[in-house]
Image (cartoon, grey):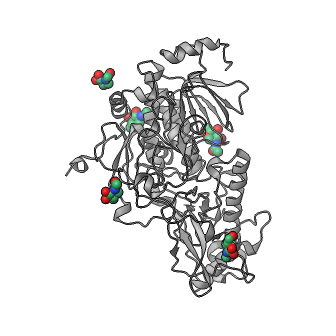
Amino acid sequence: MVRPMIPASFFVFLCAGPLPTRGYDFDVVVYGSTPAGIAAATAAGHLGMHVGVFEPLPMIGGMGAAGNLALHDGAPRTKLSGLARNFSLLNAAYYNVPSEVAQPESFVANASFYKMLNAAGVVEIKLACRLTGVKCRADGASIESINVICQKNPVSAKVFIDASYDGEIMTKTVDYTHGREATAVYNESLAGARIPTPSAVKVHALHDDGTIIKYVQNISGLARPGEADDALMAFQHRLCISGDEDRLPWKKPDGYDRNDFVLFERYIAANQGKFDGFGWPPQDMRDFGYPGPKKKYTLCCGISIAASDQPNLNRGWATASWEKKQQIIGEHTYFELGMFYFLANDPKVPVKVREEFNRYGLCADEFVEFSHIPPQLYIRESNRLVGDYVMTQNNIANPKVVPDSIAVANWWLDMHMTGKYAVPDGDGQFTVRLEGNFPHNKGTTPPPYEVPYRLMTPKVGTGINLLVPVCLSTSHVAFASTRIEAMFMSTGSAAGVAAQQLVDATAATVQDVNVTRVQEILTRRFQQDIHIAEPDRIVV
Ligand SMILES: *[C@@H]1O[C@H](CO)[C@@H](O)[C@H](O)[C@H]1NC(C)=O
Ligand SMILES: *[C@@H]1O[C@H](CO)[C@@H](O)[C@H](O)[C@H]1NC(C)=O
Ligand SMILES: *[C@@H]1O[C@H](CO)[C@@H](O)[C@H](O)[C@H]1NC(C)=O
Ligand SMILES: *[C@@H]1O[C@H](CO)[C@@H](O)[C@H](O)[C@H]1NC(C)=O
Ligand SMILES: *[C@@H]1O[C@H](CO)[C@@H](O)[C@H](O)[C@H]1NC(C)=O
């Protein structure tokens, strides 16, 4: 892929008029092989575009394969359509079962994604190839090329689809934000810093010397309720956990110090010797379509002070350098492996609890090249686009019917914790409290809603050849609902379809794309639901 020498003056012409048909490495570059990226590349490939996929990690698929989540969320609760359904059908074919498999084993998800790309003629897929730079054209509004570490020359394309979790191209080129908006910004009752909520299990937050135990934060660092800050909802690895004989015993992580896990010791003591801290036992993959026979589980979360998604370790993630991100990932790995090692081995943990944890271990047959840890950390939230339209708590599902809808979303405002604080409880004691989760109630459960094309487009006059199907233009509050992989496959497909109009020069910018045409192709060619079901469409 040697980029031809083009005189600078050429670009001046280029930005004023339609994009030329020659002189590009690709029609479309998809950065980030997340489920959105796979769908974008697959859709674009089927429509005849020349597509290149660049993935920062050494494994394809984002949370869809490299993160051991697949389409667990959004299914089976939501009816899958479009390429998300095709993915689930390919998984079903692998297992030779009739019904969709939304969450297969990760090596199966990996194979299904490759099958989708291959069937679409997308063969230029570069792994371990992260972005190092973006070159804009003289107009400042369009992207000429990107630099990636696996490629000596810049990679040029007519359209760039930034499907990465961090919006790496987006943050270098257009308006974006991260963290929590203040309540006042979009008049959202759930915005900004929250009041930490008492835990049913009361755990003392200080050591004898008055210092705060590890994994708990000083409350003086928390903004006032409703104020903006840079907190992100907690991350974790959705570890593959096995209940079979071939499981790997919990391994002591390097530098292990049992005192780092005092939180768990105290939690069990305060909970009558029982451990139910983080969605334990872990989520059975057989509940999400995987037919077995292996006993495989995916580690999740828990709204508990002893949860496996740990807030604050991700502080600074959104703007961190690659090196800093590796350090943050390492801290999550240490926390998770240390926690399991502690629960399975520490003499202070009741024998019954230790026995329970020793019945499980990491999956021996998954992520073999990555020490059995999914290479993709679950980045539940990072940077977000700020387009001309921003979806918020108040305008999700309002209006119900969106003319430029390209996807249907169906998930609650599922905000994981953003902080775990030592809070004075009045009698001189400090107890551990969680902060940032939203309550799960009617107010945080919008009906299924339509997702406008505008959530993927930068402000008019900027990023005219950039589409952003993951870091959508939503508030922190709304992103808690839009951030679901099955939904991202729909926005990704729409990005791939929309790119065609720039490639064939029927649209000059992503903001000028004829969305009616995109909707037609999504529905007819890809069987993607773009509107909520009829009964829901009756506006009362
Ligand atoms: C998706 O699956 C449907 C149903 O099997 C099939 O008709 C369609 O061709 C598939 N689409 C793609 C793009 O593979
Ligand atoms: C993913 O699938 C590709 C293509 O089938 C294969 O070459 C690769 O080894 C697989 N990787 C993993 C981690 O399963
Ligand atoms: C703010 O939102 C509330 C609740 O949705 C609404 O009642 C109120 O009218 C809004 N205020 C403004 C200024 O938009
Ligand atoms: C929290 O930080 C404040 C300000 O730095 C400090 O005065 C206080 O002692 C800290 N609290 C605890 C419990 O460590
Ligand atoms: C947009 O596409 C639709 C469907 O293909 C077509 O009917 C309509 O004329 C187009 N609109 C414009 C402004 O080109």
Q: Please say if 27 is above or below 482.
A: above
Q: Position of residue 523 (x, y in %)?
A: 34, 34
Q: Quadrant of ligand 4?
A: bottom right
Q: How many marks?
A: 0
Name the side, left or right, on which 3 lies relative to 289: right
Whether residue 280 appears in this view of the structure is: no
Write the residue at 35% across / 63% down: 443
Q: Position of residue 273 (x, y in %)?
A: 60, 84
Name the side, left or right, on which 141 lies relative to 264: left
Q: Quadrant of the N terminus?
A: top right
Q: Position of residue 348 (x, y in %)?
A: 71, 83
Q: Please say if 386 is above or below 442.
A: above
Instruction: Indicate the quadrant where residue 331 lies.
Output: bottom right
Q: Position of residue 32 (x, y in %)?
A: 58, 39
Write the residue at 56% across / 37% down: 170
Whether residue 115 appears in this view of the structure is: yes
Q: Please say if 277 is above or below 18.
A: below
Instruction: Indicate the quadrant where residue 347 lies.
Output: bottom right
